[in-house]
Amino acid sequence: MNIKISAELSHICPLADIKSQAKTLEEKGFYRIWVPDTIVSPWEYWIAATLVVTNTHHAGIGLGVTNPYTRSPIVLAQALSTLDSLSGGRICLALGKGIPRFLEKAGIKQHEKALEEAIQIIRGLSRGERVSFQGESFRVDGILLRTLPATKSIPIYLAAVGEPSWQLAAKIADGVSTFFTEDLLAKKQRFLTGNAIPLAVLVPFSVKKKDFFPEALNSPEKLTSMVEQLEGWGISELIIAYADLEDLDALPSF
């Protein structure tokens, strides 16, 4: 099987359980453990990510999807570099435009150039460069970070839902992060034909918690069928978003 199977740390995982769940995810052999950035989680994003990093040894660590508003490009670059160094080079980032309704409640205005500008800043700072940047959304004047990653370049995925985000991801990102839709294959063929960047697809799964995610798969058989479908479509990575340890115990063998 060519598709890589990853898991997203449950966004409702209790803070006290992050250590044990991170260890369990690695023991189960997941390719990567993604840490979501959500306001509804009972923990703060960077603290959860640090707990996952320090309680695993070889699994990749995906950070996000996060956004460049509540997490400024400078903070993101410094945190990424620190965690990459701490993990021995296991970090990647997924960046998106943010949830409009939440940003509105937080008094934050989105800008169409924010993602593209943030990636330029993050890449430069995390490579140890002194960055000066004058953009439409961000301005940086000669900032140099002392935190250096273990790897030369930390992969940055872009979250893609609508056509503009797919186009931007294909243009500037190291990978694409999205969720399963019936037109996923058509989008992949339209926007990534001739572009070999990896595509990671989130699929929610819960055997009993019906309110976990809309349209979450609720049986191992359905999940196995989904894996086979995405494998046939040439998807690089499937990310299983689970609710609790009961869901992990119910997972089929891949």
Image (cartoon, helix red, strand yellow):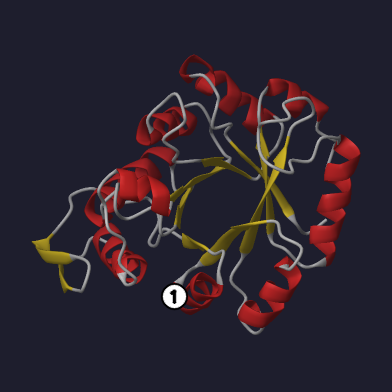
Q: Quadrant of residue 121?
A: bottom left
Amino acid of disc 1? Ile
Q: Is residue 130 visible?
A: no
For the C terminus, the image quarter is top right
Between 131 and 114, the residue placed more toward the observer is 114
* Location of mark 1 (residue): 172
Horizontal side, residue 107 vs residue 243: left or right: left
Residue at screen point 79% across, 29% down? 207
Q: Is residue 167 left or right of residue 3?
A: left
The x and y percentages for residue 250 are 82, 27
Residue 217: quarter of image: top right
> Which residue, as the protein is rendered here, is positioned at the far bottom?
194
Q: Residue at x 55, y 69 (%)?
A: 162
Q: Which percent across, then down, holds residue 171?
A: 47, 79
Q: Secondary structure at mark 1?
A: helix
Q: Residue at x 51, y 19 (%)?
A: 14
